[in-house]
Image: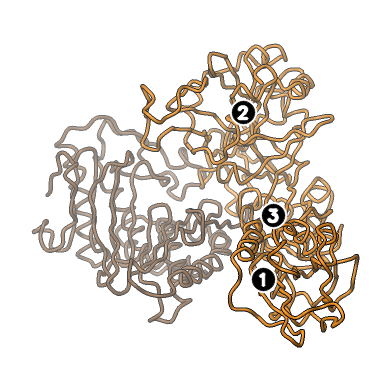
Chain colours: A orange, B brown
Amino acid sequence: MVKQRVESVANGKIRCDACPVMCYISDGRSGACDRYANVGGELIRVDPLTIIENTISEGGNVVPFLAQPGESEWDGDIVHATRRFVTAVGAGTTYPDYKPAPFIVSQKENGVDMVTVVTEGIFSYCGAKVKIDTDRFLGPETATVLVDGEAIGHVTTGEYGSQMLSLGGVHHLTGGSKKEGRVTCDALLKLCNGEAVDMQVDGGVSLTIKAGAAPVINDVEESRMRVGCGSATIGMFAKQWMGHVDEVVVVDDHITGVLSEHQAGRLLDVPATGIRIKGRRSTPGRYFQVAEPGIGWGGTHISDPLTILGDFDPKTAWPGMRMLMVSTTGEQFGYYILDDNLRPELQTILPAALQESVEIIAENCEPALTSVLFIGGAGGSLRAGVTTNPVRLTRSVKEALTHVSCGGVPAYVWPGGGITVMADVTQMPSNAFGYVPTPALVAPIEFTMRLDDYRALGGHMEAVMPIEQALEMAERKVTPIGRGPWPTESRNFRWGA
Amino acid sequence: MSRPFARYLDGDPNGRLHLQHGPIDLVIGVDDGGAARKGEAERRARAFAAAIARFQTVLDELVSELPLLRAPAEMNGPTPVGSVARRMVAAVRPFAAADFITPMAAVAGAVADEILAAMLEAFDKGDRPHRAYVNNGGDIAVHLDGDAKFQVRMAREDGASLGDFALHASSPTHGIATSGRGGRSLSMGIADSVTVLATNAAAADAAVTLIANAVDLPGHAAIDRARAVDVVDDSDLGERLVVTGCGSLTDAEIDRALSRGLATAERFIALGLIDRAGLFLRNQGLLAMPGAAQPFTATPLAIDQSMERFSNA
């Protein structure tokens, strides 16, 4: 039930421009699709209101009478067989006017009267922060990210093990050409609804990203996120190698680490081994550019790690020296012993302790994922749907009297002015987002607080309805996806923390 | 303006594909019907890609010829340009001599047929998936190869089963359509639902509209009617009366209404326009099938026993 902008009216009928059919719809009717309707001269999208229903057993309403042996006792939180939360997904909005939000729902939580103000917000100031788990170079910082040749955002500062994109925002949504806005809105909508989007980084790679899935970079799917660079890997595991091996080389496209020369090895009194690495030495035990980038060992193009080694220094090296070579993901490894001519000989048996260290490296490499956080600001008119005095809502949020969620998912509220929230789209009910032709995203947002606090901040008390009444209107029930706190739980609030 | 939209319904590309644009909603499934055959996922991906590609322009094509498609069909009327529009006109023409019908009566089925055909064209004949369907809001185009079969259930709006039937690769039926009150289209009749099996979904769609219209009790006081244009803006039915409500009916009246629909269905079967039909109103149902004199013979539609008072003609 989201209002759309009406472009054209004829003979009391409004013309829907949601699809090429361009239906003329008179008051009280819906278009050919039954998705859009004319309500009092306004075009409304009629999507099903969605609730999250947390049933303890999938079998239905199972009410435990007495704890079974082995089950935990009552934990202080009343165990309801079914717990329900009305999300804003499909709730619609009364934007841009002063009317109460579509659903202001009351329910009791552990004896406390709670109220949740449920509305879909139209966010023209919104976007997505995308984290892509990869060490690959996606493009220079601030490089433009393009979809269908239109700028939808840019590469921002990288984080450890991940590359970051900042997409959308008012500049691309409404500040550029019509097409730029439409393409940006479409890309954001898809990303937030968990669909894949193809994009191109100016001066960088082509990308296919989808929330919760591995990124595809230049048509190659990324599989694992390395534990760290080769140097970091040496630092992390140096101690575990002591006594089992004389030298360790962690092969990495970025920084290859060498135990005996590395700070970590020095601290552990690892003797020099006479090893020589072909590459550009950065600081002791750290080498850049040991090989070309590729899909071989540690993101390089090599398949035989010995190719990055020069001859061992005969003054320092000794026959029988034991050496482990391993990639940053632990996917590749080799164990070598120097022969009488100081040439490394590949061993078929890897000592158990080294096997374990390789497995730990692999275990520390998490699957590479793309994560998408929706970010948007709750504007003045959206807040007017909650209270007659909008700034009081902002204050209530800051004071932790009001909990903000998006589609039932806890939202992170940025400190400072206004209500700017971020939420993980993969935790929301499917298709939680919509759009309006403005272009802007339509996103669910719920404000939950004690009924008394709602009254105090100037809430629309006349519009409060018991949850049972809202449930009758809900057509879609979903089970919770995330493990975050339930929105009405007391621990979300200052008074219950 | 929204663009065509595609997504996987079951969380991954091996689930069903949902395509939507404006009033069109398609749910598409592709598999090998359990046959031990390599490459099912690749075939599905290829079929889905072909469906998505063809779907991009379907609605725009239809809109560009909408006036023609909304006009009553004539035996020797003009032929539209678009391939979906041609399917619609071809499907309704055989009915145009005796009944009022516009090509729009077959739009849902024709879109389903077109997308199914586009998917199959992406394969050499021996390489096709064993099963595929395109479900356009209950009007379904089906493809079967090898030993694969589809088990199809007709159900009431509340989910209660009205009966099952099976389709095999050897069945003449490649289209299923259901019409009646409760659907999105208007009906001139009072049938709760009518399901028709025909050579393709467009033919089934056209026929089902007319059979559902025929399930009626003209002049009955308990039936509310209104002009189509007063119910839906821009209806292709114009000022013709459509049913907006139906009060209580006696068993005899229900039987009489269904029998009228049955006569229409049997006429279509005799003309070779459809394969069979199931008609449902309140607590009764009737089946129309080839050789209507022996209803429950050979390969009847198996009607679920939950139909309390199933009667047959």
At label 1, counting other C-alpha atoms closer than 10 Å, the crowd grade (few under 14, some 14-19, many 20 or more) is few
Task: Report x, y in % for residue A208.
Answer: 67, 63
Q: Say what amino acid the circle numbered 2 marks.
A: Val
Task: Say which residue appears at 56% left-offset and 68% top-offset.
Answer: B53
Mark 2–mark 3 distance (CA, rounded to whole Å): 25 Å
- The residue that label 3 is drawn on is A187
The kind of secondary structure element at disc 3 is: helix
- The residue that label 1 is drawn on is A219
Task: Report x, y in % for residue A10.
Answer: 64, 41
The kind of secondary structure element at disc 2 is: strand
Looking at the image, which residue sits at the far bottom? A341
Indicate the quadrant where residue A203 lies: bottom right
Would you say B294 lies left or right of A462 here?
Answer: left
Q: Are marks 3 and 1 on the same chain?
A: yes
Q: Identify which residue, B254 or A427, lies in the foreground.
A: A427
The kind of secondary structure element at disc 1 is: loop
Mark 1–mark 2 distance (CA, rounded to whole Å): 41 Å
Badge nearest the viewer, 3 or 1: 1
Q: Say what amino acid the circle numbered 1 marks.
A: Asp
Task: Report x, y in % for residue B101.
Answer: 37, 56
At label 3, counting other C-alpha atoms closer than 10 Å, the crowd grade (few under 14, some 14-19, many 20 or more) is many
Indicate the quadrant where residue A124 lies: top right
Sequence-earlier tag: 3 or 1: 3
Q: Identify which residue, B303 or B189, lies in the foreground.
A: B303
Q: Say what amino acid the circle numbered 3 marks.
A: Ala
Task: Say which residue appears at 28% left-offset and 60% top-offset.
Answer: B197
Task: Give above or below for A201 relative to A413.
Answer: below
Sequence-earlier tag: 1 or 2: 2
- The residue that label 2 is drawn on is A118
Chain holding disc 1: A
